[in-house]
Image (cartoon, rainbow, N blue to C red):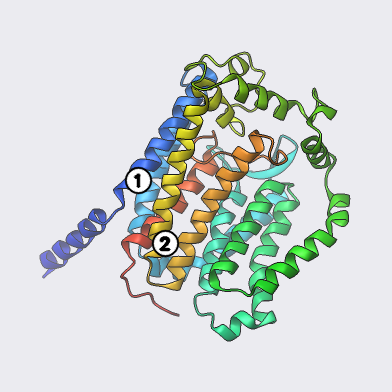
Amino acid sequence: MKNQSRIKGQSAILEKVLNLNFTLIFLVIFMACIGFTALYSAAGSFDPWASKQIMRFGVGMIGLLIISMISTTWWYQLSYPIYIIGFLMLLIVEIMGHTGMGAQRWINLGFIQLQPSEFMKIAVVMALAKYFHHATDEDLKSIRFLFMGSLLVIAPVALVLLQPDLGTSLMIVMAGLSIFFLAGAPIWMFLTGGGAVLLSLPVIWHFLHDYQKGRVLTFLNPERDPLGAGYHITQSKIALGSGGWDGRGFMEGSQSRLNFLPEKQTDFIFTLWAEEWGFVGGVFLLGLIAFILWKCVSIAMKCRHVFTRLLAMGLTVNFFLYVFINIAMVMGLIPVVGAPLPLVSYGGTSMLAVLTAFGLILSCQIHKNDKLLLT
C-alpha cells in the first residue's frame, strides 16, 4: 500500500515536470546569460558582479521550480498571508531598515540586502487576484468594494514612497490598476483616478524630494545640468549612439570601459549592452523579451480560474513594467527613477523576485486543471 502511494506520488511529480513550459524556462535562462555576459563586460572579469549573479540565479531557479510544482490552490490560500508578511517587512524597513545611496529600502540579512518592496509587487498582485476571484457584476459596480480593493494597493505604496522609492511605487500602482482593469472594473474609476492625479500634481510636486524634482526637470531639459542631475542620461545617450548599427564589440564600449557610464551594472546595463552590440543587439534583446511576454500571456489566457488568470496576467504586466521603465529611462523617454532590467541588471532581490514571479506563472500553467478550493 505504501509502495503504491509512493509510486503514485512520484508519477504525479513526473507529470508536473513534463507539463513544465520548457520554452519559457529556456528563454529565462537565455536572458539571464545575457545579463551574466554584460556584467562580466562591465567589470572585465567575473568578480565582483557576474559570479554573485550566477550563484543567485542558480538559487532562484531552484526556487522557481519548487514554486511551479506547488498547486495554485495553495497560492490562493496563501495570498493574503503573503501580502501581510510583505507589508510587515515594509514596516520593518521604516523602523530599522538599511540605508544605501540616500534611501532606506533594505533589510540587512548578512548574506543579502533584501528589498521587501520588490516582493511586494508580487504580493499585491496575488492579493488582488484573490480579492477579485469572487467578484460579481454588482461588486464591480460597488464603490465600497472597489475602494476596499484599492486599499490593498494604497497601503504598501504609501510605505514605499516614504523610503523614498518613486519607481517601485509607480510599478505597484500600475500593476494594481492592471488587475482592476482585467477584473472588469468600470472605466469611470480609471477616468476619475486619472483626473484626481492630474489635479493633485501641484501637491505631489510639493512633496517630492529635491533629487526627484531634479530628475523631472532634467528629463524636460537634459542640458540644464549636464555634470549634475543630467549626467546619467547624457552619458547614456552618448553610449547608445556610439554603439551604432552593430556595436563596438564585446568589452570594447568606450563609455563603459572608461567609466563615463554610471551604474552600468544596474540601471544602465541595457546601455552597456547596446553600446557593445549596437542596434542589432538591442533589438535582439527586446525581441527576446517580447517572446517571453508572449509565452506568459499565452499561459494566462489558458487558465480556467479567475484567480490564476489574474495572477499570471498581473505578474506578466509586472515584468513588462520592469522592462518598459528601465529601457525608456536609459533612452531619456521618461525621468530617471531607478529601475533594474529584469534578469540582466545586477541585484539579488530583484533577481529572486522576478524568478519567483515566473515560478508562479508556471504554477498557473501546470495546475490549470486543478480544482481550486474556494474558501
Q: Position of residue 178 (x, y in %)?
A: 58, 62
Q: Position of residue 324 (x, y in %)?
A: 58, 44
Spatial CA distance of label 1 from label 2 is 16 Å
Q: Which residue was labeled with disc 2? A: 300
Q: Is residue 274 visible?
A: yes
**Residue at point 50%, 26% (across, down):** 39
Secondary structure state at the residue bearing disc 2: helix
* Whether label 1 touches label 2, CB < 8 Å: no
Give the amino acid type for the residue marked by disc 2 in the picture: Ala
Q: Label 1 crowding class (10 Å Cα cut-off): few <14, some 14-19, many 20+?
A: some
Q: Is residue 364 left or right of residue 274?
A: left
Give the amino acid type for the residue marked by disc 1 in the picture: Ile
**Residue at point 38%, 74% (across, down):** 372
**Residue at point 23%, 58% (across, down):** 13
Q: Earlier in the sequence, mark 1 or mark 2?
A: 1
**Residue 202, quarter of picture:** bottom right
In this rendering, is residue 78 above or below 110?
Answer: below
Q: Is residue 110 left or right of residue 299?
A: right
Q: Viewer-proximal residue, 247 or 97? A: 247
Q: Is residue 88 visible?
A: no
The tag on residue 25 is 1
**Residue 74, quarter of picture:** bottom left
Q: Position of residue 40 (x, y in %)?
A: 48, 22
Q: Position of residue 253 (x, y in %)?
A: 56, 16
Secondary structure state at the residue bearing disc 1: helix
Q: Viewer-proximal residue, 189 or 109? A: 189
Camera-near label (1 vs 2) is: 2
Q: Is residue 120 left or right of residue 46?
A: right
